[in-house]
Image: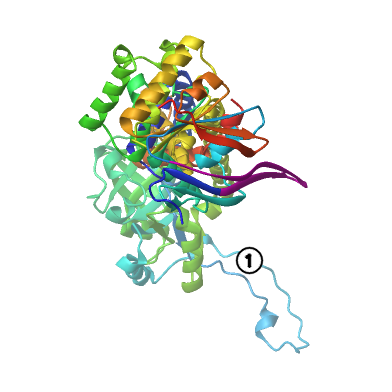
Amino acid sequence: MRITYFTTSVALRHLRYGVGQSLLTIGVVAISVLLIIYLQTIIGGLQTRLIRNTTGAIPHITLESPERVPIAAWRLTNKDSTQLYVGETVNLPKAQERIEDWRLWVGALDAPEADYVAVSPVVAGTAFMFRGARRQTVRIQGVIPERHNGIVDIESNLEGGRFLQLASGEVAMGRKLARDFGVKLRDKIRLVGPQGQTLSVTVGGIFETGFGPVDDGTLFMMLRDGQSLLGYGTAVSTIGLKLADIYEAETRAADLAARAPFKVRSWIGDNPNLFRNLQSQSQTSNLILVMAVIAAGFGIASILIMSVTGKYREIGILKAMGATPQEIQTIFVIEGFLLAILGCIVGVPLSIGLLQALASVRSVGPDGRSTQIFEIEIDPTLLLTASLIAITTGAIAAFFPARRAGSVDPMQVIRGA
Amino acid sequence: MPDPKAVIELQGVGKTYVSGETSTPVLFDISFKIMPGEFVAIVGGSGSGKTTLLNLMGLLDRPTVGALCIQGRPVQELEEEERAVVRRDRVGFIFQFHYLLPEFTVIENALMPSRMRGVRWERTHTSRMTQLLETVGLGDKLKSRPSQLSGGQQQRVAVVRALANEPALVLADEPTGNLDSKSGRVVFDLMRKLARETGTAFVMVTHDDNFALETDRVIRIKDGRILADAPTGSR
């Protein structure tokens, strides 16, 4: 490359003189840039929404007490025994699967080097909820509110009352559950646990997170209350963990499973189809992206090849007058480069405009809430990456026609005159 | 030993084109030198090898044998990039067809070789080229595009362009071949005048004996050999 006043001025003049061709190439690059930015943003937004809907209200990793696998009695005794054992496999009640030493583990998982965004011990089960003659089965989640709010953000979705400052003897419930059951803030309800334990509580908070299972049938209460209602003593049933990068869930879960005496579940393992779909969606979008880049590359290359062919004589004469092959190559690389840059200058604002227009499209859901149809977050890094891809493609696409131009033999041009 | 005063010197230059197993000798044992300010005509019939000779002198082609020196410097072994630089700095070209760049104006075309050399819009240089264009009667066409000029005018721009870098040697391949007799005369007179005024050596390949006899010296070529090399006495 030899960027000089001569090479730059000839390249610029070529572009200005062949304005039709230049505009066509700029259009091709702009559309490719638009396609890259649009696809990545829309598909990225869709995936973000899907992932948020799936993982927004659940821990990314859940630690449970390992399942108790029944062992035949004869395995524990002398194998050569001739005694006859008769027995049956009995599944122990769920409440029996508990984590007694959870404080120890929560302490360890809280350490900065463990790198979890939230660590929440939970005691979970079902109970009956009574108010007057009404009765309903509900899921009970005994939690430490300030910890569990890191798993599912209830505090900022409160419609009334409190969650972080929830007191013993208080519960928080979803708006839909409260409406269906006909209770409001500060109403008293009675709960009966699986083993008959009863607990009278006050509605201390009503929220709407947008996550159906949380809003429809879950009661949150203080960990202690949950433990006594569900008969857990001082134990918990699970420890929920939230990660900064949700895609790490599977590897982090495997790592934990190897080091801790728990059954470890990750959201990815629990939703294998969703994860596979997301992956294939990413692959499809990458494929389209590659196609768009190739189309832009071919666009630039073909226009420049036409330009080189059309200027064959001119190039020969420039070389006869003393332009070096390198200078001639530089002229055409500059042309490709400038076309790509101009394509980005047109394509990036066009993409931003289109995305902003799409972001303003809203629809009203069955719950009367107005929501964005497209999840759109314009990412400056994506704009920059798309531009860099287009410019690099332009330079690479220009290289081959440029090399051809550089190798034009002035003798042939003069002889052919 | 090459003559350092000679603008160009050829010693036993020969050229054979090889294509597959066929080799076609075109030039044999050509030796001469051209001094500054000389106006030389190379004449010969079609296929005599005069254009090949001009291409060798302009470093567009390489001799198969012999030595070629420009201003005392042997140039036949130079790399492609170096040959381009010698062409740019020391040699001017005028072709049968003008080959002006259509995207550039008359003055920009005339300044193109100096742009290649890295001279941008240096005032004295630009005014010299403007003056030259005025001398050739194109003072009012400086901002015109080549397509707006007649054939004779285009060729006059090409002559001025050949002088942009003040070369020691201008090579003209049938510069009047594409023009009517009146325009051809204007272009020829212009070259002769510029050779005298600037001290630049002009070598012109021509079919036209009338023009040839008005130069300082005629080199006659036949079948790739020099048949005669003599002054015309017209100076």
- Compare residues A171 and A212 and report the one nearer the observer: A212
Q: Please give left or right for residue B190 compared with residue A167 in the image.
A: right
Instruction: Report which residue position mark 1 lands on.
Output: A90
Q: Which residues are magenta?
A: B12-34
Indicate the position of residue A28 as horizontal and vertical percent values. Answer: 49, 27
Eyeballing the image, is B182 above or below A77? above
Please name the amino acid that badge 1 sits on: Val
Q: Please give left or right for residue B108 compared with residue A275 in the image.
A: left
Indicate the position of residue A23 as horizontal and vertical percent values. Answer: 44, 22
Indicate the position of residue B2 as horizontal and vertical percent values. Answer: 45, 53
- Residue in the image at 35% along x and 26% along y: B194
Quadrant of the image occupied by residue A210: top left
- The coloring applied to the image is rainbow
- Compare residues A97 and B54 and report the one nearer the observer: B54
Q: Say which chain tag 1 marks.
A: A
Q: Please give left or right for residue A257 compared with residue A12 in the image.
A: right
Quadrant of the image occupied by residue A280: top right
Q: Residue furthest front?
A: B233
| Residue B71 appearing in the image | yes
Q: Please give left or right for residue B212 compared with residue A356 in the image.
A: right
| Residue A212 appearing in the image | no
Eyeballing the image, is A283 above or below A236? above
- Residue in the image at 56% along x and 42% along y: B61
